Amino acid sequence: MAQILLFVKKGATIPSPIKAALERQFLKKGIEIIEKFSQSKRVLAIIVLGGDGTFLRAAPLAYRLDVPLLGINLGRLGFLTEVTLEEAEQAFRSLREGTFELEERFLLEVYFRENGYIALNEAAIIKGPLGRMIHIEVTYNEKLISVYHGDGLIISTPTGSTAYNLSAGGPIVHPLCESVILTPICPFMLSARPIVIPAAAELCAKLLYKAEEVHLLIDGHLNFTLNPGEEIKIKKAPRALKIVRSPTRDYFEILRVKLGWAEVKV
């Protein structure tokens, strides 16, 4: 039997309208709804019920299985979980019938200590609690970009440009642009500004030395402690992540709503 895998925000209750819509669109059509992944059956898609944090935790599995990922927003902001509760049943129907609109988002492969990790939003190198400056050397295809001195560095995808990158003063980049954004966090030199570079080449970030604890944070849920001299290699992942689009709203409308941009009527 084919399955739909649910990722539900920790501690959240599935709203009654969502339960009813899931039953009408999937269970009554012979498609099983599960909340724990099993390799014994075929997963058609992953549905996230929650916010962007839950969506980010589901993304590596959706990438590995190469199945569509649909986010239903149960929170407040939610750039990734862009489908509203009111749109949910329409989105479920289109998912079941195969008429949904997909958007492919490229991801980063982050290699650290001989292990690879998938990042949809960003890899961030950040200082610990002592408040001392850290020093990060970054190269692009083995050519030096800069040595960043400050509180850290965010290496972001366009999808993640509206997340930590935006909070740190980085630019908003349309998610279909295949680029990587480097955004220093509180740099010592005011001339150290965000830079957007092509995603085709390999980045390497190295911690030169440290006077305090330093962390590598991947999509907000994987956390590693960095030692001086350790390198983080980052490149574009071989495949894209398939995200089911909102059935009624485009990217710019979502930006206007989420960021509170005023619409001027002439």
Image (cartoon, grey):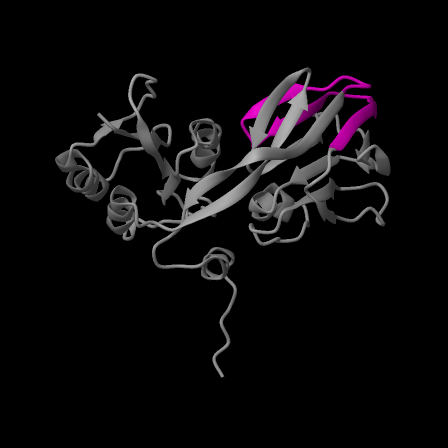
In the depicted structure, whether residue 31 falls above or below residue 97: above
Q: Position of residue 24 (x, y in %)?
A: 15, 41
Q: Is residue 23 left or right of residue 144?
A: left
**Camera-nearest residue between 133 and 15:** 15
Q: Residue furthest toward the bottom?
A: 266
Q: Is residue 113 left or right of residue 208?
A: left
Residue at 75%, 41% (x, y): give it: 184
Residue at 68%, 42% (x, y): give it: 199
Q: Is residue 140 left or right of residue 219?
A: right
Q: Is residue 229 left or right of residue 51?
A: right
State which quarter of the image contains the N terminus: top left
**Camera-nearest residue between 265 and 235:** 235
* Highlighted magenta segment, given as a residue range: 203-230
Residue at 42%, 39% (x, y): give it: 51
Residue at 81%, 34% (x, y): give it: 139
The answer to which quarter of the image holds residue 147 is top right
Q: Residue furthest toward the left?
A: 28
Q: Position of residue 150 (x, y in %)?
A: 80, 36
Mark count: 0
Residue 226: say if magenta.
yes
Residue 136: say if magenta.
no
Q: Position of residue 103 (x, y in %)?
A: 46, 48
Q: Position of residue 178 (x, y in %)?
A: 63, 47
